[in-house]
Image (cartoon, helix red, strand yellow):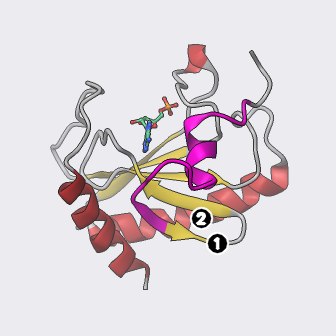
């Protein structure tokens, strides 16, 4: 399927039908903690308007999303005391995409520390809350 499925997980999070640990929201974009973080402080940024990924997104939604990505990248780096940030964005299954609502991964990085493998293990809720709190504090 290459059309947008309004019942994807992130659409449900945007509609409030599924819970998430939110870190930021404005009129056009939303950011929340990845539930299976590949690094502590792993944040996802999504546009509110529907698109599967980079390939079908409206350029204006991309502009708004990347501005929020920059805002969150700065807050993640500061809040998590990271040395750098890795930005990831996957398109279609062959490109590594699993959830088909456009999203950007913001991954804090520390010198000499590798990303964790994607094992499917969910983070402890308290850890996600603690990291989200640190990132939210750095947004102010
Ligand atoms: P991908 O589509 O490959 O870019 O990856 C989707 C990402 O969404 C993965 O990193 C998952 O850990 C993450 N994810 C899946 N379900 C949820 C959820 N309910 N809340 C937060 N993150 C999620």
Q: Quadrant of ligand 1?
A: top left
Report the front residue among 90 and 11.
11
Q: Position of residue 104 (x, y in %)?
A: 54, 46
Report which residue position mark 1 lands on. Answer: 26
Residue 118 in the image: above or below residue 73: above
Residue drawn at x 54%, y 54% as measured from the top left: 45
User: Is residue 37 magenta-colored?
Assistant: no
Q: Position of residue 103 (x, y in %)?
A: 58, 43
Which label lies toward us, 1 or 2? Answer: 1
Give the residues in magenta.
Answer: 5-23
Quadrant of the rendered structure where residue 30 is? bottom right
Q: Which mark is residue 92?
A: none
Residue drawn at x 57%, y 55% as measured from the top left: 16
- Say if disc 1 is inside 8 Å of ligand 1: no
Counting residues from the N terminus, which is met first, the one under dot 1 or under dot 2? 1
Residue 92 in the image: above or below residue 94: below
* Classed neighbour count for the residue bearing mark 2: other residues with Cα under 10 Å, few (<14), some (14–19), many (≥20): many
- Say if disc 2 is inside 8 Å of ligand 1: no
Task: Evaluate if marks 1 and 2 touch, with contact meaning CB atoms under 8 Å apart.
Answer: yes
Report the front residue among 110 and 34.
34
Quadrant of the rendered structure where residue 69 is? bottom right
- Circle 2: element type: helix
- Number of numbered discs visible in the structure rendering: 2
Residue drawn at x 29%, y 26% as measured from the top left: 120
* Classed neighbour count for the residue bearing mark 1: other residues with Cα under 10 Å, few (<14), some (14–19), many (≥20): few
Residue 113 located left or right of residue 91: left
Residue 139 located left or right of residue 29: left
Report the front residue among 95 and 99.
99
- Circle 1: element type: loop
Residue drawn at x 59%, y 45% as measured from the top left: 12
Q: Position of residue 114 (x, y in %)?
A: 21, 37
Q: Which mark is residue 68?
A: 2
């Amino acid at each position: 399927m290459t059309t947008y499925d309004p019942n994807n997980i992130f659409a449900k999070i945007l509609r409030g039908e599924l819970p998430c640990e939110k870190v930021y929201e404005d009129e056009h974009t939303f950011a929340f903690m990845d539930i299976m973080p590949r690094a502590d402080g792993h944040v996802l940024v999504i546009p509110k308007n529907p698109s599967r990924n980079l390939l079908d997104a409206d350029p204006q939604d991309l502009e708004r999303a990347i501005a929020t990505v920059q805002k969150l990248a700065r807050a993640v780096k500061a809040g998590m005391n990271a040395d750098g940030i890795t930005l990831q964005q996957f398109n279609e299954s062959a490109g590594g995409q699993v959830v088909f609502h456009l999203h950007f991964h913001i991954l804090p990085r520390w010198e000499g520390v590798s990303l964790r493998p994607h094992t499917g293990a969910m983070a402890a809720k308290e850890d996600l809350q603690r990291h989200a709190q640190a990132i939210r504090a750095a947004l102010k």
